[in-house]
Amino acid sequence: MAELQAFAPGLYPRSEALVQATRDLDRGRTTVEAVDEQVERDLAELVSVQKQAGLDLLSDGMLRWQDHFRPLLEAADGLATGALTRFLDTNTFYRAPKAEGRPRLGEPLGDRYVAPLPGPRLVTFPSPFALSHGTGLTPKEVADSVLRPALEGVEAELVVLAEPFLAREESPDLDTLAEALGGLGDDLALWLEFGDAGPLLGRGLADLPVSAIGIDFYATNLDDVPGSFDKLLLAGVLDARSSLPEQPRELAEFAARLAEKAERVALVPNGDLQYVSEPIAREKLARLGKAKTATTEAAA
Amino acid sequence: MNDNDKFLTHEVGSLAKPVWLVKTAQGRELDASDIEHARSWGEKVGVEGHEELVELLERGSADPDEVARWSSRYCVRLQESAGIDVIWDGEQLRSEMYAWAIAHSNGFEPRGTVRSFDNKYYSKSAAVGPVSVREPYHNEEFSFLQSVAKARLKIPITGAYTLAVWSYDEHHTPKEGRLGAGYGRRREIEARRELTLDIARNLIRPNLEALIELGADWIQIDEPGASTEADELDLFVESFNVSVEGLDCFFSTHLCFSDYDLFFPPIEGMSGCRQYCVGFANYDSRELGTSAADRPGYEVITKFRDLPYEPILGLGVLDIHTDFIEPPELVRDRILYAVEVFGDPGRIHVCPDCGLRTRSWEVAYEKLRSLVEGARLAQEALTGAPV
């Protein structure tokens, strides 16, 4: 049996209480301090949910991030927020990164955007390709001048680089991406969100200089994963765009099939869970944990 | 321009709900500034009998439905006072464009709150069974506005594709068997098609028929979700056609915050759409000028011009996501550029990019006034005579 983990990178949905608090903030009906307190309560609840589910690495859910890029765009010189843009095929929008000069991040984002957590953790940032997408900058430029400074001092067992765009590129340039990823350190995962990774796997995705690759198995055929996958496989088995709850039995059976392809597997969502409401995300995490337990017990 | 050589101006959809409506609906106490808001806006835009509302609010026991009707009157007068030619009430009598439709339909269940962007969210439901209309859900609103409005009315209704793509689909999506199976887009699209056409036939069309029966002569089918899936544009077109086919009315559609290039060529098959109301200002420069280089946000309008059935373009000239008040001269230049591209001012209407509900009434009002003045300046520039 392969080594099996489970965890949940990316943007996690806000609770109804935090939704209301942030709405009230925009309308001048509450204070920043009150919203901060609710964020802390949401974070404590998220940690509790992950622990109860038995997840191996904790995530902070990026609860203060307005989208995948915003804190980096606001903190870095030479980058700015651009047009409000639809995120893939969801009804959620983000401010597209825009270059206004040579990008430079002076210091890490700090605790506000990478919240301290009580245990082994992961941290999620945009991949260099995603951050440079549409800006005219190269992935290596943003990797060297923005992501590398952002990662300095971050203590995490795994840095997950979220990549929503690459799988939808007609002619993806993996060599350029490899060059960008090469300088970002160890324990990196490239997490391809919401897309068919099959064509990229055929082009050498698994050879990129990262220790883990994330694949959306609601869009990707398992047959497209090479038989000798020697990295940690982040298997996107929770459908973050569906309100339907996954069946732990089906996840466990699929995990067993994954073990035939990869020595090390982590069960994860196929993208940010923020595309479902918080109660649904919480239920999905619980089922992810049950699936891991069922798989492990079956193997034992 | 219309028959009077004037650019026809119209709103798009929503306006913010005033705090006195929100608080009344939530059972919260109003403070003096809330009541002052009702009084000052009543005076400012000329709401007949607004003193009655002020008294109601001061007594503190107002019926939320009655207050909503007052809010509707205010928004009608706000737009009329700004000089807009074709109006609606900013959806004051609806909860929200998606939630209202779903709440009056069979076959959906709520699934919680999902982020739209930043601190904006929407309630999302799931289709859980066959879809049908419980009752035509815009009739009461339309009849009320017929009794209130002095300007021409254009009623917005959320379209079938947007309702489908903004919902989860637990009815047509297989509950198991998709993992690692290469389930594929073809089968996803088939499932979406079933849901979308179900909605078009059983929700949208009955509403359209009922509104036409009541006298509606311009219905705007809102499809902000139309380009969500680039490979489902044909389905969006099919659902529009199924919704309106054979009905006698001026049908338009509203598109916003999308890669508009995706709509071509699919909407060549949407000849029942007489006007496309589209947001462009969000992508445009704030500098003055009427050349293509000056107007980067409007590059795609040539494709609307070239549609074989020659629809009118509702030209979005106000960015609804900023408090920046577009100077009339900027609105003018955006219009003049569009006229230059189209070669026919009769195919240009003027509107905001989208509903203005994320702006305060103060900002929305100033933006709309600027829009009207910009349209006047454009008319003046084209006719060479003061208007």
Image: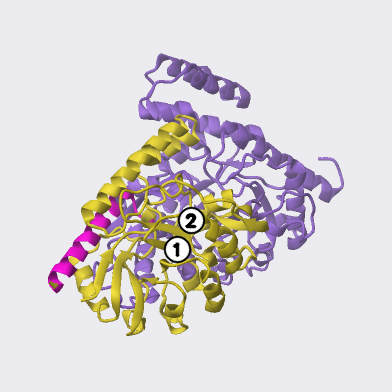
Chain colours: A yellow, B purple
Q: Is residue A97 visible?
A: yes
Residue displayed at 70% across by 39% down: B370
Q: Which residues are magenta?
A: A275-299
Furthest residue in direction right, as rendered: B384
Query: Tag 1 or tag 2, which sits nearer the N-term?
Result: 2
Residue B25 colored in magenta in the image: no
Q: Chain of mark 1?
A: A
Q: Which chain is home to disc 2?
A: A
Disc 1, SS: strand
Per the rendering, the mark at residue B1 is none
What is the magenta segment's predominant secondary structure?
helix
The type of residue carrying mark 2 is His
Q: Is residue B223 visible?
A: no
Residue of label 1: A162
Instruction: State yes or no: residue A277 in magenta.
Output: yes
* Residue A68, disc: 2
**Disc 2 to disc 1: CB gap under 8 Å:** yes
- The amino acid at mark 1 is Ala
Picture residue at 57% right of the left edge, 46% below the top: B12
As drawn, B18 above or below B172 = above
In the image shown, does A97 or B300 lie closer to the viewer? A97
Distance in Å between CA atoms under marks 2 and 1: 8 Å
Image location (x, y in percent) of residue B48: 56, 23
Residue plotted at (20% across, 73% down): A253
Q: Position of residue B386 (x, y in %)?
A: 85, 40
